[in-house]
Each structure stands twice: as structure tokens, then as C-alpha cells.
Image (spheres, rainbow, N blue to C red):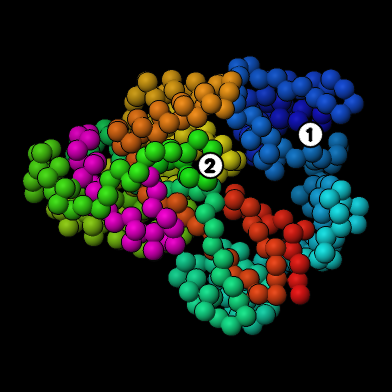
Amino acid sequence: MASLEHFLDPEATNPGRFVLSRLSDVRATGEYTVELVTETPFAPLLAHLAHPVAAIVQAGLGGSLDRNPVGTGPFRFVSWEQDAQVVLEANPDYWGGEPAIKEVVVRIIPDVSTILVELRSGGVDAFYGIPADSYDSIANAAGLEAQRFLGWGSNYVGFNLENPKLQDERVRQAIAHVIDKELIGEIVNGLPAVAAIPPTVAFAAEDLVEPYPYDPERARELLAEAGYPDGFDTEFWYMPVSRPYYPAPRDVAEAVVSYLGDVGIRASLHTEDWGIYLDNYLEGKFPMYMLGWSADFADPDNFISSFFNEANAQGFGYNNPTLFALISDAQQAGSLEERDALYQQIAQILHDDLPALPFVNPRTLNGVWNNVEGFYPNALGSTVPFNTITKK
């Protein structure tokens, strides 16, 4: 009860409170059961409960967990050396059985090149999240294995539909046709995306093939039909920071601007402080820009509502009441079949209106020594269940 009741406190400062903001009451109905109450039906609730901030913790320990974590997992906290390492030991009383690895040392090494040196020399057994441009060298190194897997991430090129030059959907379609997603995928080691919901998440678009294949000639035709046979001048804003969904933002931005130039769209490159960037995109400052999403939980609502519900669609200057109603209906649907049908409709509308161009579904890249087995980061791209690991 205590683990969930603190989410009901309007004065709570928990930064993850948004995960269970829909809760209105928590009631004990038995020794091992609780009843969760929301003011309206909320189908993604189970996915939200799987988020780490909703974990069950002992009452009264909330204020000390950041330095002395306590839980029921496969490992126990031993020590934390600030900016250096965290040490864990196997929990012999873990309900799933004691892990084969008796100690795990998680090292904090800020410099990527130093991590790569440590990995190649055997100073570390595994490196989670290797840079895309280092993947091949790790894959070809003796004794090392390069892993990559498609998780729950996505990225896109956003359009401001209030910008006069981008209001005509044919202009947005032209831009979609002139960008070679395959090549962008090579830059970030990802796969071309066809919809806002990644293919690894439930209710992803099932029958939607690549809607805008690379076709510069078709792009020129669409621009001419829209009244821009010679193209136009605009701005393209790119993120100033590397994120899991855009590990090389400047490289991607330069490639996009080059593609746009091929059909006469003369886009100048711009960026700014990350916090200001996030504020300004919501205020509609950018004609075109880069952004993406790493899932908080494995539910399609996390990808759709975060950008396309009525409150958040302002970042695109986008207003579609029909879409907003469908998103609300999908949140409240009472069956999986109903939710699936609704998200297929949502995918089709986003395809037709094109407020944003789904770009690439990024893959997480890891380097692991071949005597380490069972290194499986989860699809959220945030944690490693160390109890699956064995070392020869």
C-alpha cells in the first residue's frame, strides 16, 4: 500500500509521479491484494505499473533508498563510490534462485573512448550502448561479440503545420520521399521506421508498408504541384545532445539537409541548448526539427499520447479532433482487440496527415566478451537483468 499511496500525495516530489498520475485511490482488499482506482478507465495501467518507479518498497524507506537501496531482486547493494562504481553481490535468498555471478561491479566511465579501451583490454566484460561508428571494430575484434537489438525507441522529423510552406501535405510528402531512410539507418545503426509505434510494441501498424519510399523525382513532382517548383528556403533544427534514439544528431541533420537540397529545399542548420530546444519545439518555433522517444513502458499510448494527443500536438501545430478522440478511446478501451483496431486507425491518420515523418527505429548496440553469456539488456534500453549472466 505504502509503495503506491505516495503517488496520491499532491505534494510528493517524486520525479516519476507521472507514471501513476491516473490513480485516484488505493485500497487493500486482502492480505496480498489491492484495488487500484482511476477516475476514468485507463487501459495502459498495467504497463505503467511495470515501470521501476512503481516497484514495491518497504514502508518508511523512501527517503533513504537513493543511497541505501533495498529490494527483493537477485542482487544486494554493497557500495557506491561516487562517479566511479557501484558494487552488488548475489542475493542467496532471491525468490528466483541465487544468481551464478556472485559479484557485479558497474563502473562509471564518462569518456566513451576510455570505455572502448577498457573493453578491448578486458578491463570490463561488457559495454552497454557502444557508439554506432564503433560497432564494426568491436564485431571484428578477437574475443569480442558485438550485439544489437531492436528495442522500444523511435525518432522522427517533425513539421510545424502552422508554417505556411509546410501546410500543404504534398510538401511534407515530398520531404518524406527525398530522405533515404536506409542511409540514415546506417548512420545510427537502426532500421527504417514506417509508423510512430515501433514494431516491437503491441498494436504497431500491421499492414503499413513503407509509405514514402526514397524517390527524389516524385518529391520534385509533389513540390511543383504544391506551387514550389524551385523549392524554398527554410530552417532545420537538430538536437544539441546525443540520445539513444538519435546517437549522432549532427550527422543525421547534415544528411537530411543534403537530401532536401537535392530537390531545391534550401534548409539552414540550427541548434540551441537542450532545455530551450524542448521548450521552443512545443511553442512552434521550428519549421522542421528532430526529436524522438525512448519508451517509459511498453504500451503504444506512451508513443502516441506523448506527441499526438490534444495537449502535445501543439509542437506540430497540428489539430485533428478525430485523432484526439481516437487516442482517448484507445486509452479507455476494454479489450485488446478494441485497442488494436483503434491504434490501426490512429496509424493510418498519422500516415495520411504526416505531422511527423517516422524516421528510424534505433537499435541498442553492446560489446561483450565471448566468455560472457546471458547479457540481455531489456527492451526499454535501461537495465540489465544480471541474474541471467554466466561467465566461463
Image coords of residue 313 (percent x, y): 39, 31
| Quadrant of the image occupied by residue 99 | bottom right
State the quadrant of the N terminus.
Answer: top right
On whether residue 257 falls in the magenta region, the answer is no
What residue is shown at x 38% (from left), y 53% (from top)?
192
What residue is shown at x 59% (from left), y 50% (from top)?
379
**Kind of residue at disc 2:** Val
**Kind of residue at disc 1:** Ser
Image coords of residue 325 (percent x, y): 43, 20
**Left or right: 382, with 131 as reference point:** right
| Quadrant of the image occupied by residue 317 | top left
| Quadrant of the image occupied by residue 30 | top right
Q: In the rendering, which numbered label is found on residue 3?
A: 1
Residue 13 visible in this rendered orientation of the protein: no
Is residue 240 depicted above or below 348 in this figure? below
Gap between marks 1 and 2 measured at Cα: 27 Å
Residue placed most toward the observer, 266 or 192: 192
What residue is shown at x 33% (from left), y 36% (from top)?
351
What residue is shown at x 9% (from left), y 43% (from top)?
224
Which residue is outermost to the top? Answer: 39
Is residue 238 depicted above or below 309 in this figure? below
**Left or right: 239, with 55 as reference point:** left
Residue 326 visible in this rendered orientation of the protein: yes
Closest to the camera, between mark 1 and mark 2, is: 2
Q: Which residues are magenta?
A: 167-194
N-terminal of the two: label 1 or label 2?
Answer: 1
Is residue 392 depicted above or below 349 in this figure? below
Residue density around tag 1, few if under 14, some if 14–19, many if 20 or more, within 10 Å:
some
On whether residue 188 falls in the magenta region, the answer is yes
Residue density around tag 2, few if under 14, some if 14–19, many if 20 or more, within 10 Å:
some
Q: Main secondary structure of the magenta part?
A: helix
Q: Which residue is mark 2?
A: 201
